[in-house]
Amino acid sequence: MRKISLFIAMSLDGYIAKPNDDLSFLKIVEKEGEDYGYAEFTARIDTIIIGRKTYDYVLKEIGASHYDNGQRDIYVITRTERPQVGRTTFYTGNLTELVDRLKSESGKNIYCDGGAEVINELLKHDLIDEFIISVIPVLLGNGTRLFKDGRPEQILEFITTKTFETGLTQLHYKRKK
């Protein structure tokens, strides 16, 4: 069965963005030739679930090719219907139903790249199987929290921790069955 993996960065105090969806703090750990395992991770996935605000930000800052390499299905979770673009579907239906369907199909793993609303909806239904969280050495004090209140407690199983010269620490857990 396919699993859903979260691969995301947050500040030490738990924020994935500063106010106004500002991700500039990620530049603190940018280093030539260092992708923190992203290429290795994305080689194991063929489907991406992403919130519309995160998708729009990446489109503007990096470009569509960051997600759509022609070999992945992309589901942008949105409230506004839009026509499909290539393999990118703008999904307005029930997120749990989408995930159940995707998990039952054959294929590689599924990557959830945020944002916080999508992540927390998946957490409410215990649908995230693997957590790869990169902690950036900064205290932001305000912004968009990775983990919101009001979701069920979940016990995780530790896999590994990696540390990098830039001060980034990467935590890897999986959902305890």
Image: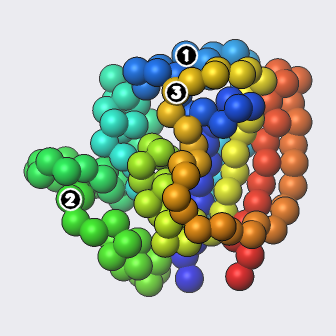
Does residue 110 appear in the picture of this structure?
no
**Residue 157, how many percent across, how many down?**
81, 68
Secondary element type, mark 3: loop
Q: Nearer the viewer, mark 1 or mark 3?
A: 3
Pointer 1 or 3: first along the chain: 1
Image quarter for residue 56?
top left
**Label 3: few (<14), some (14–19) or many (≥20) C-alpha neighbours in 10 Å:** some
Q: CA distance from mark 2 to mark 3?
A: 26 Å
Q: Which mark is residue 35?
A: none
Pointer 2 residue: 92
Judge by depth and name the residue closer to the eye, 41 or 49: 49
Secondary element type, mark 2: loop
Does residue 104 appear in the picture of this structure?
yes
Pointer 3 residue: 143
Direction from residue 83 to residue 28 in the image, left or right: right
Q: Which mark is residue 24?
A: 1
**Label 2: few (<14), some (14–19) or many (≥20) C-alpha neighbours in 10 Å:** some
Residue at figure coordinates x 64%, y 21% from the top left:
140
Q: Amino acid at mark 2?
A: Thr
